[in-house]
Amino acid sequence: MASHTARSASIHAVRRYYEQNTRLFRALGLGNRAHAVHRAVWDEATATFDAALQRVNALALAEVRTLLAEQSVSVLRLLDLGCGLGGTLAYCARALPEARLAGVTLSMTQAQIAQRTLPRARAVVITGDFHHLPFTANFHVALAIESLAHSHDLNRAFEQASAALLPGGRLIVCDDVVVRAPSNAAEERWLTTFRAGWCVPGVQPLDETIAAARRAGFVLRRARDLTGALRLHRLPPFLAGAARDLMRLAGRASLFFHSVSGSLALQECLARGVVAYHLMVFEKPIR
């Protein structure tokens, strides 16, 4: 019962986080340009801010096209786990005009915005939990971009992704992972603040994340560390801790400030090398 209660509390926390913050994020300009609040990635192929905002989508699309080149697929079916405002689905819809698309988000507000963004004839967005998907094995590709971090049970999340994919299907994950244990109390506090502020209990060690995928039957095809392509916005050390604590106090009145404390903590975790931003491509083998 305690475990069930903890799972329910985690799901409620993530839903509440996005229900209360989504419209504010958009009012502040976050998510308006790309209909997403993903990280901007400035790698060798990126020259503009708009391209940086779309870079993870472009990398995911490249993986989809790799699958299409390797397999005979008549009509591609793609599922976005934690689709948010539908930005990645919209990007894929423009590039893959014959594809059939589906998205899942905990937030009714996000689902409504996403459905208005997407072509209704080819895309559907449902309000639901990716730990309990209402789909059978029907998809060629599943995406999880900055969404598995919200998972309270990575084993279950990977199992459900596998159950929704056809044999030979790909799961494309882009998210934060822990790449080394905190070496002192300060780093431990930064990591704890990041997880709490952004409601991301699924930010776990890289090897444990890959192991959870393997337990669900996935094989890791490739992985890429994108951390070096992020432009960090780190406060001076004498300000960072004070700002974090101030935002956490303000977060008692508003989840937005709770989110800001998580953002400050993420910058520190990335800069200190505790957390990294990884793209991983998994395959569900053909038995």
Image: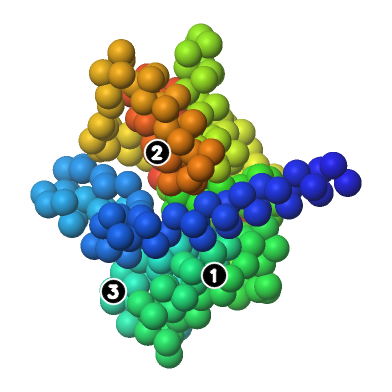
Which residue in the protein does label 3 denote?
95
Percent of width and height locating residue 216: 68, 50
Q: Residue furthest top?
A: 184
Percent of width and height locating residue 178: 50, 29
Q: Residue furthest left?
A: 47
Which residue in the protein does label 1 denote?
108
C-beta proximity under 8 Å, tags 2 and 3? no
Residue at (31% x, 19% y) in the render: 239
* SS at badge 1: helix
State the separation of the CA atoms marked 3 and 1: 26 Å
Q: How is the image coloured?
A: rainbow
Mark positioned earlier in the residue sequence (2 or 3): 3
Which residue in the protein does label 2 denote?
260
State the separation of the CA atoms marked 1 and 2: 23 Å
* Left or right of residue 20: residue 24: left
Whether residue 283 is visible here, answered yes or no, is no
Vertical relation: 241 (above or below) 254: above
State the separation of the CA atoms marked 2 and 3: 34 Å
Q: Give the amino acid type for the residue marked by disc 2 in the picture.
A: Val
* SS at badge 3: helix
Q: Give the amino acid type for the residue marked by disc 3 in the picture.
A: Ala
Q: Residue furthest front?
A: 253
Depth check: 69 or 245 in front?
245
Q: Give the amino acid type for the residue marked by disc 1 in the picture.
A: Met
Q: Quadrant of the C terminus?
A: bottom right
Foreground mark, 2 or 3? Answer: 2
